């Protein structure tokens, strides 16, 4: 690659945390339940923590979030579970039982830490990222991929559908929110 | 103490509270109570108190009574840390300690010397107690039901006898629908 090529190579499309935040607000989320994820820590979790309209509950381990979200929805409170893909894998049994088998409206926002920009999750270098979508598919959990600002419009309809149909949804954060 | 005898006393103090049952304590509760506000946190062991925390936040006007087991709590010890921080005033968390995984064949928990009240105090839970005598339970239950929480009470109980286990009944969607309808109607 010569200097000219390097200067003209396309930069990865941007994902701005502020736009995702607005989609979360527009989705009438009351509570965010989270274990910090390096992928979303600065671009999402930090502004969420500072937003007076969102109640943030920091939990110790990801499966706690499924129980808390279940209890919240009985009181018509919407929750967003913000975790890393490793936490998603850890919490698999709780997701299976509480979200899928009990048919609860659970919103899982999952950071794909280390996924190469613009690369499809199933083509990622990291094994743990490659298996996320197939696991969601076999569990029958609808998924959307947010790679850049162009995808953010998918978030609110996906959350609304989860609550309208009482089913879980996975929002995969592929791009790193800036 | 006998777990069922403890629950019989608790039942006399229940009016419009949401009771969150889990596994063995849940089966015992189901054997003496049938109400829309009985909620069973089954399928993912350990999450009973997390379900209770969510309910407590969503419905702050109601007392939430969690019937947890020692094996379940050990699977989710971090819940005490979370509850200690969130500190819902309306959460009453009972843990029945019989030192065995009664719902899973009666094998011992990893460490029978575990001091759950000490862990709860360390997690900054507002009110913490341990009760080994049923007369003490009867003496204190009215207070625990009314004071501002969160309140954590460890109950030393003997193993079994295990109640009838009807998993299908405990899992049935109608139970969750009934709770939803009861809360919507303000029951």
Image (spheres, coloured by chain):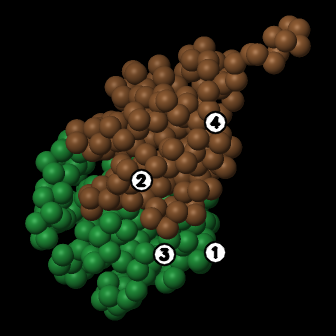
Chain colours: A brown, B green
Residue B122: which disc? 1
Compute the Cα span from label 1 to label 4. 37 Å
Q: Residues within 10 Å of mark 2 (few under 14, many from 20)?
A: some
Q: Is circle 1 on the same chain as circle 2?
A: no
Nearest to the observer: residue A91 or residue A124: A124
Compute the Cα span from label 3 to label 4. 33 Å
As helix, strand or loop, the secondary structure at mark 3 comes to loop
Instruction: Output the chain of dot 1.
Output: B
Query: Mark 3 = which residue?
Result: B87
Compute the Cα span from label 2 to label 3. 25 Å
Residue A137, x across and y down, in percent: 40, 21
Between disc 1 and disc 4, the foreground one is 4
Query: Mark 2 = which residue?
Result: A25
User: Residue A174 vs residue B47: left or right?
Assistant: right
Task: Specify whether residue A153 is in view.
Answer: yes
Residue A176: which disc? 4
Instruction: Output the chain of dot 2.
Output: A
Q: Residues within 10 Å of mark 3 (few under 14, many from 20)?
A: many
Between disc 1 and disc 3, the foreground one is 3
User: Residue A68 vs residue B125: left or right?
Assistant: left
Q: Is circle 2 on the same chain as circle 3?
A: no
As helix, strand or loop, the secondary structure at mark 4 comes to loop
Compute the Cα span from label 2 to label 4. 19 Å
Residue B177, x across and y down, in percent: 15, 51
Q: Residues within 10 Å of mark 4 (few under 14, many from 20)?
A: many
């Amino acid at each position: 690659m010569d200097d000219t090529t390097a200067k003209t190579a396309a930069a990865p499309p941007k994902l701005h945390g502020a736009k995702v935040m607005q989609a979360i607000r527009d989705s009438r989320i009351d509570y965010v339940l989270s274990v910090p994820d390096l992928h979303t820590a600065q671009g999402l979790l930090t502004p969420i923590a500072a937003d007076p309209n969102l109640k943030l509950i920091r939990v110790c381990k990801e499966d706690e979030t499924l129980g808390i979200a279940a209890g919240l929805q009985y009181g018509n409170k919407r929750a967003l579970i913000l975790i890393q893909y490793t936490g998603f894998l850890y919490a698999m049994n709780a997701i299976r039982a509480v979200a899928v088998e009990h048919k609860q409206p659970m919103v899982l926002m999952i950071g794909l830490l280390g996924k190469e920009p613009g690369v499809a999750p199933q083509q990622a270098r990291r094994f743990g990222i490659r298996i996320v979508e197939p696991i969601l598919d076999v569990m029958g959990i609808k998924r959307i991929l947010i790679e850049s600002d162009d995808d953010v419009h998918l978030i609110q309809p996906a959350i609304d559908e989860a609550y309208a149909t009482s089913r879980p949804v996975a929002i995969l954060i592929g791009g790193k929110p800036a | 103490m006998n777990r069922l005898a403890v629950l019989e006393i608790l039942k006399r103090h229940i009016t419009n509270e949401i009771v969150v049952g889990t596994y063995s304590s849940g089966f015992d509760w189901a054997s003496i109570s049938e109400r829309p506000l009985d909620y069973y946190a089954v399928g993912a062991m350990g999450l009973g108190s997390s379900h209770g925390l969510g309910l407590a936040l969503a419905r702050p006007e109601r007392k939430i009574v969690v019937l947890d087991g020692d094996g379940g709590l050990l699977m989710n010890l971090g819940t005490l840390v979370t509850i200690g921080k969130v500190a819902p005033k309306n959460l009453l968390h009972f843990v029945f300690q019989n030192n065995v995984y009664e719902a899973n064949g009666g094998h011992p928990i990893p460490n029978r010397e575990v001091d759950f009240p000490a862990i709860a105090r360390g997690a900054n839970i507002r009110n913490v107690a341990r009760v080994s005598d049923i007369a003490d339970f009867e003496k204190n239950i009215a207070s625990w039901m009314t004071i501002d929480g969160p309140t954590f009470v460890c109950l030393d109980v003997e193993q079994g006898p295990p109640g009838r286990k009807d998993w299908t009944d405990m899992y049935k969607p109608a139970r969750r629908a009934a709770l939803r309808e009861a809360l919507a109607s303000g029951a």
